[in-house]
């Protein structure tokens, strides 16, 4: 089964806010779907956390390497693309685009073999996983209301991030966390994402230590991105001293970038993004490396329904991956698949057990956000 072409569809119109200092707008494109077409009529779908202009440019560069390749060999084909792109730089738009291709190739392999991707990754440790509702921070009162609405949807785990946290005062930070804990209740999981990868993040180790102590008082489950994404030594020291787990790694790409962080003990929880790191193939290797270094893999899922589906299958393949991220209020999560996503009575998501990624795209919805007619095959 050969690859005949790869199409890219940038999503626009209802792009959710990111909480960044240079905030994205609804018509900005930061998520792009890719469709890998084959000569057997099967199409695999993947997702890329990158603007479609960059993805299309990368596909043009990569085309001589993937055209005519075997669509049933995702890991080998993806590694071929990585290996031959050293001269264009590693870790940017090229790597992000390979991520989407790789996800789509695993989707094709699952369809061709009649197996869900998680089983092809070596076996399924679970049939469902707990999604945590991911939302932006706000002032205490509106945040409390927002969390209560999300809780009413059935979520039992919550992560709030960015917004004013760490950007105004310690007093406001604590007021935000106190309001959040009151809203979700004592029995819910609550996580905090400082957003240290934001432009010109100014808080350092001492701020992170003081804030970690405050978060522990409110039984926060983990503290995410408390430092700038290049502060390796500070992360190592913080992880050793902080009274709660430290999480990060969403800005890193490819396993080679994760290796020094995992070996140094910079994280309790590592959060690679499958739509950026190199796809399912690369994230599986990162997960293995994390296991060997006593670090838990919990995927970063700030992307699309296809990224969520890939995360669900990865969660099924690792015994300690009990959470996946679920960005709330995004039509790129909620509207792109036929039937959407439903939580069960315990706030859990079923991991698809049908072939490939196990989701059926609503091509009308994809066409609406892509601004063009999207073909099934």
Image: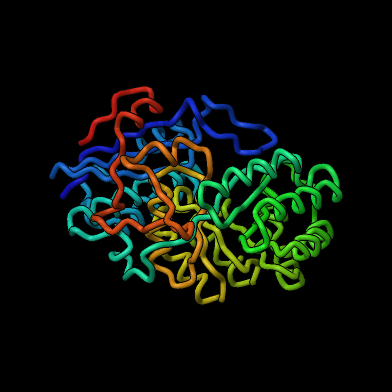
Name which residue lies at 62% across and 52% down. Answer: 159
Residue sitting at the far left: 40
Q: Vertical placement of 373 versus 362: above or below?
A: above
Q: In the image, what residue occupies the spot 85% across and 50% down?
A: 170
**Image-quadrant location for residue 55:** top left
- Please provide percent x and percent y for residue 257: 55, 59
Say above or below: 250 vs 124.
above
Q: Nearer the viewer, residue 221 or 21?
A: 221
Q: Is residue 63 visible?
A: no
Residue 268 rendering spot, x and y as whole percentages: 62, 69
Choose top left, top right, bottom left or bottom right for residue 258: bottom right
Q: Position of residue 218 (x, y in %)?
A: 75, 62
Residue at (61% x, 60% y) in the render: 188
Label total for image: 0
Q: Is residue 244 left or right of residue 74?
A: right
Viewport quadrant of the C terminus: top left
- Is 314 situated left or right of 117 in this image? right
Q: Please give the name of the residue rendered at 57% of the width and 45% of the height, measured from the top-left corner.
A: 150
Q: Is residue 96 visible?
A: yes
Q: Position of residue 307 (x, y in %)?
A: 42, 48
């Amino acid at each position: 089964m050969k690859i005949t072409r790869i199409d890219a569809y940038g999503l626009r119109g209802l792009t959710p806010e990111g909480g960044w200092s240079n905030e994205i707008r609804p018509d900005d494109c930061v998520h792009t779907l890719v469709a890998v077409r084959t000569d057997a009529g099967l199409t695999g779908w993947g997702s890329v956390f990158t603007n479609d202009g960059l993805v299309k440019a990368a596909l043009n560069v990569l085309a001589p390497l993937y055209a005519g390749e075997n669509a049933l060999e995702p890991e080998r084909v993806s590694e071929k693309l990585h290996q031959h792109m050293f001269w264009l730089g590693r870790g940017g738009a090229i790597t992000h685009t390979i991520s989407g291709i790789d996800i789509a190739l695993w989707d094709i392999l699952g369809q061709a073999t009649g197996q869900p991707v998680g089983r092809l990754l070596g076996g399924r440790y679970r049939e469902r996983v707990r999604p945590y509702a991911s939302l932006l921070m706000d002032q205490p009162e509106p945040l409390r209301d927002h969390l209560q609405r999300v809780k009413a949807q059935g979520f039992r785990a919550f992560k709030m991030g960015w917004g004013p946290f760490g950007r105004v005062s310690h007093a406001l930070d604590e007021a935000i966390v106190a309001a959040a804990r009151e809203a979700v209740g004592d029995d819910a999981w609550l996580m905090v994402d400082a957003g240290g990868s934001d432009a010109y993040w100014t808080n350092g180790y001492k701020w992170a230590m003081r804030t970690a102590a405050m978060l522990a008082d409110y039984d926060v489950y983990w503290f995410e991105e408390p430092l700038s994404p290049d502060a390796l030594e500070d992360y190592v020291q913080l992880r050793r001293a902080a009274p709660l787990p430290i999480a990060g790694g969403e800005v890193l790409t490819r396993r080679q970038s994760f290796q020094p962080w995992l070996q140094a003990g910079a994280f309790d929880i590592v959060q690679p993004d499958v739509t950026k790191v190199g796809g399912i193939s690369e994230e599986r290797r990162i997960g293995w490396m994390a296991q060997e270094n006593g670090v838990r893999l919990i995927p970063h899922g700030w992307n699309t329904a296809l990224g969520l589906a890939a995360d669900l299958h990865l969660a099924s393949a690792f015994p300690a991956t009990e959470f996946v991220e679920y960005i709330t209020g995004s039509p790129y999560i909620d509207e792109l698949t036929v039937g959407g996503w439903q939580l069960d009575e315990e706030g859990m998501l079923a991991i698809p057990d049908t072939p490939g990624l196990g989701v059926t795209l609503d091509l009308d919805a994809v066409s609406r956000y892509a601004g063009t007619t999207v073909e099934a095959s």
